[in-house]
Amino acid sequence: MELNPSDIPDTRLIGYTCPHIPIEILSSTGCKPYCLLHGDYALMQQGTRYARIDACPLVRANIAYVIENKSKFAALVGTTGCDMSRRMFDILGEHTRIPVYLMHMPRTDNRQIFSNEIDWLVKQLEYLSGEKITERLVREIESWETVRRIMRELDAKRMSRPTTLLTSDFHTAAQYYYKGEVNIPTTFSEKPSSKPRVYLIGSEVSYESGDFLRLLEDDLSIVGDFVCGLSRFLNISISEKNLSGIKEAYYNQPPCIYRRPNRVFYDHVAGQIKKRICDGIIGFTLDYCDSYEFELKKMEERFRLPLLRIRTDYSFQKISQLKTRITAFGEMLAP
Amino acid sequence: MNEGNSKREILTPRERFGLLLIDENPDRCNIIPLITSHAAHIARIPLSKYYTDGKAMAQAQIIALEEYRHDALSFFSEVGIIAEAMGSDFDYPDDDLPVLKTPALTKRSLSSIDIPDPKNDKRLPVYLEALEYAYATVGDKIPLLAYVPAPFTTGMMLSVPNTFLIQTIRHPDLVHDIMKICLQAAIEFCYHIINAGGLPIIVDPLASSSVISPKAYEEFALPYERKLIDFLHRYDLDIILHICGETEPILELLPNTGADLISLDKVDISLALDKLSKKMRIVGNFDTSKIAFSSPSEIEKEAKEMVRKGMVSSKGYIPSTGCEVPIRTPIENVKAFINSSKEIAWYWD
Amino acid sequence: MYKDPKPKKITMDEWSVRFKNIDNKTIKKFVYYNNHDWGLYLQPPATFMVYGTRELRRLRFDNSLAALRMWGFVFNESERLFRARQSGKKIVATMGDLGTVSIIVMAFPDCIPFYPECIWWTPFFNESTVLLDLASELGAPEAACFSRAALAAFVKKAYFPKPDYIFASTGATCDDYSCIMQSIEHLGYDFMWLEVPLRRSPAKHVSMDSLVKTKNGFEYPRRFEEYLIKEYEKVWQKMVEITGIDDQNLLMVSIKKANQVRTLVEKIKRTTYQAGNAPFPALELMTIEFGNLYGYADMDEWIRILEMIYETIVERTKKNIGIISEDAIPIAWVNPTADPYLLDYVERIGLRVVDTEYVINQALVEIDEQIEPFRALAQSFMQASLIGSTAQRISSINKAMRTGKIEGILITNMLGGSHCAMETKLMERLLKDKPVLAIDVPAPFGITEQIKTRLQAFAEVLHERRK
């Protein structure tokens, strides 16, 4: 059921990186919003031709993916969200002719900057596509709101006690959303699980992370997450079906960990961990992902739950060791 | 690292010492018992190796540091090192400190005595080697105190001590001449110590009131201590002056030396604080016979009492021993002193 | 008065010998905060070595009195900050923007700004991992900018006093320090976060903004400047709250002072880089450039030091006397090196630094004194190194390469540093076929023979190309 790039109909894509970029605006151009969430190890290795080995594995993989598939992309939209991700667009601008639009995503609480940047993006994309985006927004909002509603229903199954939906299955469905497909699969085998309940926080889970999630779920139940590539977008809920509504919904979603100060992030996650009755936390970080690496200690102090740190470059070179650690963590959490 | 106290030590000894020198309260007092040749006992090496082999001296100091976790290393064996380099002869007992055998001025005239070259003459290079080794090994974390005999003490080691004392009365000009050359020798040694990473600490035990009168101190010792300290102040170094033995009669003279820290021995700490603590930082002054012979519990009690008194010093206080820790002092006793001091010597919450 | 000998780079030991000839009157002449009790700072490198600055044993220094004065002043900074506090001044940490917020803080009487991130040199000067080890214990990853030492310094409170207030700039700039600042805030410090905008080149066809052009030719939407102005107004208000003083004329005075420094440094750099023989060493010049950030906590004294250095350099240039070999190959240096030894080392192997991109462009440009001060500050900041594209960042170096003024480029990176990881390969591409050497600066005391060999090979390649 996993979605492969070759399965995507021959529509051009607008690549994007950040959950604060409104996909309704991107899809109003007639293109598919395609989140750059590639974490394939081979792609990442190819990416070292363009960025150093100490660049984020996700960024390296996506650079390689976009350069290899440049004809598919009508445009790229990024933000200043994280520095490596922002600089990825410098590299892609140099190696491809794909139009690049880089938004300044405020790190501090600054609604005005965000609003102005959305207006700017709309103008750029209207010029690029020749479409009057604001006229197509209502349809796109409705369409994507429907997808998010369905995904929330799936999330509720993850969250239920006992949980009945695997996060690896949720991930499969979420891939459709991230790849701009509205027809998401909704039928998964549902089995109640009594494994220890954990919350997943950290760096991006990639399209290729299914095996990793399944490895975790051999011993644990992932009942919630605050991770790009999984359920971050569920916090977006557009009530007013116009550009203002989009701005409100996208700005008001719980901020990333790199928001300064990041206490709203902590408050949100703390609330989720409580709501989802978690026994432990998985702190998942990609190599050189400072935003999370710096915060793991704080998370342990703040959330006061056992936290298993998993750092990876998306490879499975240490899978046996990882398996042992996950199993031990599961045993530790088991009642 | 936190043996003997429950608080977490955030600072390294070097950071702690640095704060003291700029008139800031560190996390806790620097605790610097004068662990000199006692280090050889801890390292289980013969004393003769300790004071003739720079690397051995440094390693012994580092081993003592690992054992005690005090706040500065003390490079010293005995007060004759400059005099020896100027021509006095010393015996080197295998397991005791060097002993003055033939003072230089009994063999030759003052005019024939040269300023020694610390890189080459007698055991001065031992100290420089020890400093360089320790500096490279632990110099980022801990200050290295290099003890330099003051001119008066060196002068007495150039002569037969009794004769020298008589000369202070009968031939004061001659004594001043001796002092001048001893001052130059001390300056030259300090210069090399600084370049090896050590902080000179001036020791003038033979200028204490146990040996000479306050008047003699003021005339023959103090001016040269002052000149030596003035030289070191050109480098903006904060200088400790250590005078062991009796110092009560000269307490009020001590600020005139220009020393930034005064290390005292046999004096009532309350009196010293009263007279000096607004002008100098106080170092001292646990009774060394007690550290050698009392029980750990007695030491703990008295050390705490001393630290409590000392910490009121407005310019800062270093709990220390009044003189060198006796060589064969039981380890438990030194630990009792250090750990009990650490328990209560906190400035930060 | 000490008379400078023939220009030369000398060791710490040689400085100690020379220091004997400096009279007490000269030593007492130079003081910070105009205080003759504790403000003396003219000391030889050996003094700082005694207090733990271990790398001084293997560095070589310029032998002028001006350089000695500079080093004494710079190494005294920690003490100076504590003395400032003891004498009733307010200490304000201005983190992350490197060069602008400090000017606002300095406008307030008895307020001393400083950049805690500059402590990143301390582990290297001290050849010590004490700060980095504690930073790791506090949660900083090992593959991150060495400025993580600042996190440990905030805990230790032994390198600078606890600031009265902290301004922290974040946004379209490097991630590492943003994360470090967040970790510092977690320690319980009181912060004001400021937004640093992106310097986005305007779209060719569609623009909703009026544009501003920087002196170096980069355009950006005016609204980004407006964002900054609002941030600077917030800083001003906070400082008014802290000090009870609200006089914007003082800001003009502060800007003039900053410009005085910037102009002097520009003259120093230009004179040095254009001279036939290098009249001043690269390590001293990097130290001079970074003085633009806040004058090492005493701007007035720093100006006097710069004037003395400039006189020394002019004098040497007139006589065409240099401190390194005449046929040294001119190179550009990109990213400041955390380990000062590298700057000294390249001069030993026949390279000469004649252009730099030390991520502080914003602190080097002159601030417009003819316009409203907050706008002037915003415009100066919009020329910052890290808020634009990589191509912009190296455009001046690229230009110098084309005219033959530079024959090679040395990039010093840090493993895991966010912009280092992403920019280096792109820079190499943008610099086309020009010789570029990129190296990772290792942890303290980690410059191995391997790194030296790479640098030597780079120097040999450049010398061969000349033939």
Image: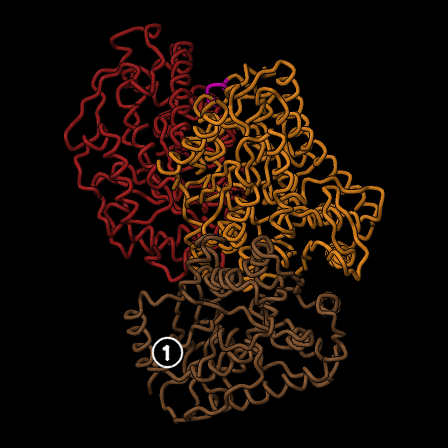
Given residues A335 and C191, the one toward you in this image is A335
Q: Is residue B295 above or below residue B113?
A: below
Q: Residue furthest left?
A: B94
B236 left or right, relative to C318 = left
Q: Is residue B263 magenta?
A: no
Q: Quadrant of the N terminus of chain C?
A: top right
Q: Secondary structure at mark 1?
A: helix
- Please identify the quarter of the rendering in which residue C37 is found: top right
**What colour has chain C?**
orange
Q: Output the chain of dot 1.
A: A
Count of numbered tags: 1
C411 left or right, relative to B33 = right
On the image, the x and y values in percent for residue A198 come to 42, 81
* Chain drawn in brown: A
Given residues B322 and A240, the one toward you in this image is A240
**What colour has chain B?**
red
Q: How is the image coloured?
A: by chain
Residue ID at (41%, 60%): B7
Instruction: Identify the magenta region.
Output: C15-20
Residue ID at (25%, 10%): B106
Please name the predominant secondary structure of the magenta segment in the image: helix
B125 left or right, relative to A65 = left
For disc 1, the marked residue is: A216
Given residues B21 and A24, the one toward you in this image is A24
C366 left or right, relative to A203 = right
- Please identify the quarter of the rendering in which residue B54 is found: top left
On the image, the x and y values in percent for residue C409 come to 53, 36
- The three-letter code of the residue at mark 1 reads Leu
On the image, the x and y values in percent for residue C45 come to 49, 29
